[in-house]
Structure formats: structure tokens, C-alpha cells
């Protein structure tokens, strides 16, 4: 998460604006899609309930009409004068031939009414004296109605019309699954009850139920008042609900539509009670199928939304590009100044925020360029001053070196002179000692500075008087002639011994 946040913070303005716009568009799109989905889902569910209510009402009306026809056939048989007369004569007659006569009269009447109603598979008439059929199907020879469950139901019921449960036909040899409907009545003058029984063909009833079930994934059931299945038209959901007595009973106790779980899914259920039978019509429709209608709407909306988003993204991308492109160009110019040392400015003609930035950038560049020029000038001046100081220091070092060298040379010269003077002194001492022995004049001690001054006063001596010439260039005296031992020898005034310049006295001067 931190990396993503850091990457977002370091991203360019164009990327940030694009992500922001995309996020806003997707949020708006998802919010609109969710809101529209729930709105449409509510409308579709409401329409589905309305359609289911219409279908359920139609099924109720249709099944009521079919079952009413069955009950009416029993009433018509009972009210038929020929049937009434033949049955009364048979029950009140003691003649042995009465049963045969009754059979020839009653069976055709029963057969006629059976034929007029396809839903009836067989009709059976019970009397205390004997039983009669429609003669369409043979009966079981050993069948006794008085010992059957149907007779007990007829006796225990307080109604004249008794509806039995789904069962295998025990009267006729076909043994079809039938729904027995009984009409209990009595004959005037006779003390026992008679029963007219019409067997409804379950297969045909199921076919009728299939005819009224719409082809929209709906299922339909017929159940009795205690929640027991009569028949069904539908798939696995109807079968699962029929086997779940608790769920089916809960549906029957609820008025209107309710949600019921069956076969791993949710179903919208409702029921209607029939007027002519103690049965209920139960309607089931999968919510998945109901909401499946929303898929096309959702897909269309998604396609339209995607197209709108793409158009908006293109438009907003161009807008973002128009906003961020000048900033990108300005950023590139800044990098060029930093990397390439390119001092070219950035021109932007419009007077907006970017224009203000560009003018500030150009002014900054000019100011920086001026500062750099001043810096270069100052650096050049510093370099010149540094060079001058270096030369002066070099000259001073050279002068110091020369002075030190001169001092060392002077010291060496003085040392050499001192050594030479010491040697000459030793030689002079030796000669003076020898002169004393020969009777020569002793050496007089003189001041060199005074001698030097006198020599400078006598820069020009007459050769005829002295017999020698003095050249006083600096501190030097050159003797020419006079004394054969010193003739031609150069004598430095810094020497401690100097020959006297007196023409009358040959005296050796000692310089102090």
C-alpha cells in the first residue's frame, strides 16, 4: 500500500488527473448501474407479481370451470327425470326383473353424461340394493363399495359433495390414477343413501393444468386443503415443494405473494382457493428467472455506459492533455536548464496560471544568467589577484633566496679571507722575526679605516718620488717596484699588513 501511495505521489500530473477522472467516472457508473438495477429489479418484480396474479387468477377460473362441470354432471344425472324414475322404480320394486330394467335405463344415462365431460373417466352409482356403471369399463367382480374408504368418507362427510384423495381406481379394472368426486343423495320413500361417483382422470387434469401454465419458467400445483398434492405442472421446483409439506403448508397459510426456498433457490409463490373444490392452485416462479430479465437490460445499460465512459474518457483525456501539456513543456525546459545548461526561456501566450509561471520562469532565468555573469567576472578578478599575489610571493622568495645566498657567499668570503689573513699573519710573523734578526724596522700597527682614508687622499702619487703607483679602486693597493720581495703583489686593505707608502721609510704597516 505504501508503495502504491508513493508511486501515486511521484506520478505526473497527467497520470493523477487521468486516474482521478477514471475513478470518478467508474464510481458514478457503478452507482448509477446499481441504483438502476435495484429500480428495474423492483419494477420487474412488481410486474412479475402482477403477471403471476393474473396467471393465478386465470388458472383458478379455468380449473373451477372444469371441476364445476364435473359436479354439474352429477347434478344433471340426479335431476334427469328418466334417471329419477328408473332409480325410484328399482329401489321401491320387489320384482326380480327390476334390476335388469334399471340397468338398461340407468347405464345409458350415466354413459351419456360421462361422454359430455372429457375430464370424467368413469361414473359409478351405488345403491343399497345394487351398483351400476356407465358400461364403458368393466368393474372388479369382488369390489364392494360398502367396504371402501370412499364409503366411509361419504358417511362421515356433512356435505353432499365429497372429494376424495388421489388413488388407484379400485372399482374399474383399468386402475388409473383418479380423483373421485361423490354426490350423496336419497330417494323419496327409500330409507338408504345412494352415491353417484365420478372419477376424474388425473392425467387429463394434469394436461389441463399444463395448458394454463405460462412458458416463463413458472410451475403450478393443485393441492387439497391439508396441503396434500393433487397434481402438478412444472419441473423439479414444483416437485420439491410438493414433497416439502411444511413449506407448502406455509404457502397455503400466507395471503398474497411470498418467497419460498425450494431446490436450492428462491421462488415467488402465491395461491388461490377454488370455489367448486376444496383445492388450491399454487403458483411458483423462480426469482432467478424473474431477475433474469434484468440481464438484458443490465447488458444494454453496461454497453451504453461503457460507450459513454469511452467518449468521456477521450474528451477528458484531451482536456487533461490541453491542461498538462504546457506544464510538461515547462518541466522539460526546466530539465534542459539543469541537464543541458540550455538557458532558453519558455514562451506561453495566454494570461492564465501557466502563463504566470512561464513569465516567472523566464524572469528567474534572466536573473540567474546575470548572477552567473557577475560570478564569472568576480572569479576572473579573483584569479587575477591570486596570480598577482603568487608572482609577488615568488619574487619575495627569490629575493630572500638571493639574500640568503649572498649572505652565505659573504660568510664564505669572510671565512676564506680570515683563513688567508691568518696564513699571511703567520708568514709575516715569521718574516718579522727574521727581520729583527737582520736589524729591520719593526712593523707599526695602523687603523685600516685611517689608512684607507689616507689612501683615498693620495689617489695620485708621483712615481718619481715614490717609485711605486697606488691605484685606490676600492680597497686595493698595488705596489710596483721599490721592494723586490713585494714587487707586483696585490695587497687588499682588509689584510692586516700593508707596506708603508712612505718613500723615505721602508716600513711594514700592520692593520688593526
Image: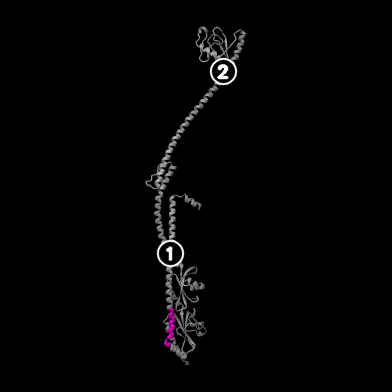
Expressed as whole percent of the image width and height from the top left, the position of residue 326 reads 40, 47
Query: Along the line of sight, which residue is nearer the eye, 132 or 304?
Result: 304
Can you say whether 314 is above or below 426 in the image? below
Q: Do the numbered discs 1 and 2 sit on residues whose CB atoms are within 8 Å?
A: no
Task: Magenta stretch: give its range.
Answer: 66-83
Taking the view exactly as shown, the residue that stands out farthest to the bottom is: 95
Does the stretch in magenta take in 375?
no
Q: Which residue is mark 2?
A: 417
Say which quarter of the image contains residue 295. bottom left
Foreground mark, 1 or 2, reads 1
Does the rendering let one see residue 315?
Answer: yes
Provide the secondary structure element on which disc 1 rests: helix
Expressed as whole percent of the image width and height from the top left, the position of residue 231 reads 47, 75
**Residue count near mark 2 (Cα–Cα under 10 Å), binned few <14, some 14–19, many ≥20:** some
Provide the secondary structure element on which disc 2 rests: helix
Query: Along the line of sight, which residue is nearer the eye, 363 or 488?
Result: 363
Does the rendering let one see residue 144?
Answer: no
The label shown at residue 39 is: 1
Expressed as whole percent of the image width and height from the top left, the position of residue 471 reads 51, 12
Taking the view exactly as shown, the residue that stands out farthest to the left is: 349
Say which quarter of the image contains residue 81. bottom left
Amino acid at each position: 500500500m505504501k508503495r502504491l501511495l508513493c508511486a501515486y505521489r511521484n506520478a505526473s500530473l497527467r497520470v493523477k488527473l487521468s486516474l482521478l477522472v477514471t475513478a470518478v467516472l467508474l464510481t458514478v457508473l457503478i452507482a448509477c448501474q446499481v441504483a438502476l438495477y435495484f429500480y428495474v429489479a423492483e419494477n420487474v418484480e412488481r410486474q412479475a407479481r402482477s403477471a403471476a396474479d393474473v396467471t393465478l387468477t386465470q388458472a383458478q377460473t379455468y380449473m373451477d370451470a372444469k371441476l364445476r362441470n364435473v359436479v354439474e354432471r352429477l347434478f344433471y344425472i340426479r335431476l334427469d327425470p328418466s334417471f329419477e324414475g328408473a332409480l325410484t322404480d328399482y329401489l321401491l320394486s320387489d320384482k326380480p326383473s327390476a334390476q335388469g330394467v334399471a340397468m338398461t335405463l340407468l347405464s345409458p344415462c350415466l354413459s351419456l353424461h360421462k361422454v359430455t365431460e372429457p375430464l370424467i373417466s368413469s361414473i359409478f352409482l351405488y345403491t343399497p340394493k345394487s351398483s351400476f356403471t356407465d358400461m364403458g369399463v368393466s368393474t372388479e367382480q369382488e369390489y364392494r363399495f360398502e367396504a371402501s374408504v370412499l364409503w366411509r368418507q361419504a358417511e362421515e362427510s356433512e356435505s353432499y359433495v365429497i372429494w376424495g384423495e388421489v388413488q388407484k381406481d379400485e372399482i374399474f379394472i383399468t386402475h388409473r390414477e383418479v380423483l373421485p368426486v361423490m354426490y350423496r343423495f336419497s330417494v323419496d320413500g327409500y330409507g338408504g343413501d345412494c352415491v353417484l361417483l365420478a372419477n376424474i382422470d388425473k392425467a387429463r387434469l394434469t394436461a389441463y393444468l399444463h395448458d394454463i401454465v405460462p412458458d416463463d419458467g413458472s410451475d403450478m400445483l393443485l393441492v387439497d386443503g391439508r396441503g396434500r398434492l393433487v397434481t402438478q405442472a412444472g419441473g423439479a421446483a414444483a416437485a420439491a415443494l410438493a414433497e416439502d409439506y411444511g413449506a407448502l403448508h406455509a404457502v397455503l397459510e400466507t395471503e398474497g405473494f411470498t418467497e419460498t426456498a425450494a431446490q436450492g433457490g428462491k421462488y415467488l409463490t402465491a395461491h388461490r382457493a377454488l370455489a367448486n373444490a376444496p383445492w388450491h392452485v399454487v403458483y411458483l416462479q423462480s426469482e432467478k428467472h424473474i431477475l433474469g430479465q434484468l440481464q438484458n437490460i443490465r447488458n444494454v445499460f453496461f454497453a451504453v455506459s461503457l460507450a459513454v465512459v469511452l467518449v468521456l474518457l477521450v474528451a477528458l483525456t484531451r482536456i487533461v492533455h490541453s491542461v498538462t501539456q504546457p506544464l510538461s513543456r515547462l518541466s522539460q525546459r526546466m530539465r534542459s536548464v539543469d541537464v543541458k545548461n540550455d538557458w532558453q526561456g519558455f514562451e506561453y501566450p495566454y494570461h492564465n496560471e501557466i502563463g504566470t509561471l512561464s513569465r516567472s520562469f523566464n524572469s528567474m532565468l534572466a536573473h540567474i544568467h546575470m548572477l552567473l555573469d557577475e560570478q564569472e567576472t568576480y572569479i576572473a578578478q579573483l584569479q587575477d589577484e591570486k596570480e598577482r599575489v603568487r608572482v609577488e610571493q615568488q619574487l619575495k622568495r627569490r629575493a630572500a633566496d638571493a639574500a640568503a645566498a649572498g649572505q652565505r657567499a659573504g660568510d664564505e668570503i669572510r671565512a676564506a679571507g680570515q683563513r688567508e689573513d691568518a696564513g699571511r699573519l703567520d708568514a709575516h710573523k715569521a718574516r718579522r722575526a727574521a727581520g729583527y734578526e737582520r736589524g729591520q724596522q719593526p712593523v707599526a700597527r695602523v687603523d685600516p679605516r685611517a689608512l684607507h682614508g689616507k689612501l683615498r687622499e693620495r689617489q695620485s702619487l708621483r712615481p718619481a718620488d715614490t717609485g711605486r703607483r697606488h691605484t685606490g679602486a676600492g680597497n686595493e693597493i698595488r705596489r710596483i717596484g721599490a721592494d723586490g720581495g713585494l714587487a707586483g703583489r696585490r695587497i687588499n686593505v682588509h689584510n692586516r699588513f700593508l707596506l708603508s707608502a712612505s718613500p723615505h721609510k721602508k716600513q711594514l704597516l700592520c692593520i688593526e
